[in-house]
Image (cartoon, coloured by chain):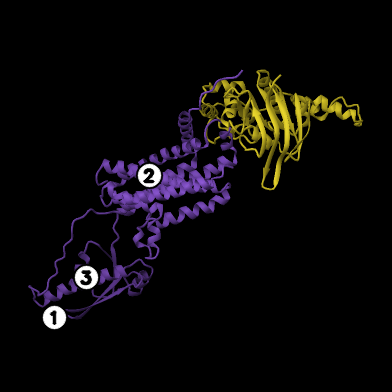
Chain colours: A yellow, B purple
Amino acid sequence: MSDIISVKNLIKKYKDFTAVNDISFSVKQGEIFGILGPNGAGKTTTLEIMETLKTLTSGEVLIDGYDVSKHPWEVKRRIGVQLQSSAFYPEVRLTELLDMFAAMYDVKIDPMEMLREVELEDKAKSYVKQLSGGQQQRFSIASTLINQPNVIFLDEPTTGLDPQARIHLWEMVRKINKNGVTIVLTTHYMDEAEQLCDRLAVMDHGKILKIGTPKQFIQDLLKTGFKKEVKQKQANLEDVFLNLTGRQLREN
Amino acid sequence: MKKRYSKPHQIRAFFVMMKYFFLAQTRNPGTFAFGFLFPVVFISIFGLIGNSTTPLSIGFPTNSNLNNPIISTIKKQSYVKIQTGSESQLEKSMKQGNLSGIINVKGLSQNPPKYQVGIITSSANQQTASAITSMVTEIVDQQNLQAAGVTNPAITIVNQQLAGQQIRYIDFALPGQIGFALLSTAIFGTVFGLIYLKKALVLKRMFATPTHAITILLAQGGSRLIMAVLQTLIILILGIVLFKFYLPHGWITFVELLFLSIIALIAFLGFGYFMAGLVNDENAAGPMVNLITLPQFLLSGTFFPTSELPNWLQPIANILPLSFFNEAVRKITTEGGSIEQTIPYMLGLVLWGAVMYLLAAKTFKWE
């Protein structure tokens, strides 16, 4: 598989603060790539440079063959972007928002069809602020697909969602990925990283500490002689919660 | 997998965005309050003020002589409102500002009839005081001449009044209300609107699309322009229908007013963009917006003419952007002038606008 994203020696400096400190990695076509790290690690800054929303201080970032510094407009056309907060114009209905984004990407779409994809067709006439957290995130994901992008970026897509909504969103992300869209996401949930991502990069203090598959990560740690006290636990509390409340998605 | 893309059509994005930005405004209660409700309430109040003339209210003490030719002549004046009461009651009423003056006639002798006329006026209102004094002086002079049998006095006064257009308060106030609505739409709407869009990452999400930032800002401005034209239309039509607002040249004046409103809004939007670019937080924007708008509402001839301001303040008041607009509008409405006469004011507006757009371009922070 070829690389759809390649980041080389990326540095982003603010006056006296280095947010991203010389990182390099690549993302393969068709994979789900996760960037893990605590708050302030530089995940969002890295993402926003790839999304052409921030300029880089030095280094090179290629998205689908285009340099983000030299050809930002080519990059913008080929990517889908979801930001941390659901960032949509107030007092504009869902179908209208999709119609507006279609104009901004200069493509033709059927807004109802797009809403059906993310199971929001009955909310067509609503405003974003009237949606639940999970619905907002799903709408946000629908908006990333308007221009049929080759790669989409999701910034903490499940933060603040209840367990049912998270599982539902993961299924949606997998479905989009199966259709051939490469996905780059940030998260600070380990279970999300483990279940959803093909490969991971762990970031802290603007540096990438390690890149690999979730399986590799665990094997490497075990090879160092790391041992966790093993208790025979057949289930964890999340299993209990989901068993009690069911896996069915809750809205409203 | 690779597709060929053509250059994005900024024109389509512009019009579609403008459409939805406009729809969003119509769904926002703030637009309705500042843009329509306030101006309409104001012109309704001013329309009613304009329909009544304030009379001279004069008090006659009950213990004075009320049966004489002086009193009866005063009573005949159409602009005089009479009140009677005890001397102390009337004085109290005058001190409270409810009475313009007290006329106290004393009979000195029956045959031949001789009278003494006492005038008491309030020092608080020099204008009505002199009006009452001159009215009484004139009546007394006439009756003295009559009593002396003079039918052909040496000196006569020819008092000629030219028939002119009667300017009511509504004719003065309505243009000010259009200015008020335009400035509110341009500044409140743009500043708080854009700050929200920045804070909620709405603008950022839009910047991730292949639409230029400037197209987004232009669509914002365009949607406010449509709103402003609607506001001007509604205020004008209400003024014309309900209060017979005077348009000297009919529909030509009407179209000229719309044109002036568009020029003014474009200039005022410059202020909006400048301030919205400078700060990123509603709390910081509040005082700044008030600092720009409040003095203009008060000093720019919105509610009363700038000529009533103290002399030292007038040069400052006259170059405020809202003053330029108000002056220009009154030139073509109350003064019945032509659009060419408004060119200096339009240039003033354009200059203010240009300075603000330049400052905005230099200082605008997108996030």
Q: Which mark is residue A72?
A: none
Q: In the image, what residue type sits under mark 2? A: Ile
Residue denoted by label 2:
B263
User: Pointer 3 indicates a residue of which chain?
Assistant: B
Please indicate, yes or no, whether residue B213 appears anywhere in the rendered image. Answer: yes
Decide which of B101, B349 is in the foreground and name it: B349
Q: In screen coordinates, is B55 left or right of A151?
A: left
Q: Which mark is residue B71?
A: 3
Q: In screen coordinates, is B94 left or right of B29?
A: left
Query: Disc 3 to disc 2, how far (Cα)?
Result: 57 Å
Residue denoted by label 1:
B112
Q: In screen coordinates, is A147 left or right of A19?
A: left
Residue B320, position in %: x, y?
Answer: 41, 55
Could you tell which of marks 1 and 3 lies nearer the N-terminus? 3
Q: In the image, what residue type sits under mark 3? A: Ile
Residue A94, position in %: x, y?
Answer: 55, 29
Mark 2 lies on a secondary structure that is helix
Q: In the image, what residue type sits under mark 1? A: Pro
Q: In screen coordinates, is B64 left or right of A78?
A: left
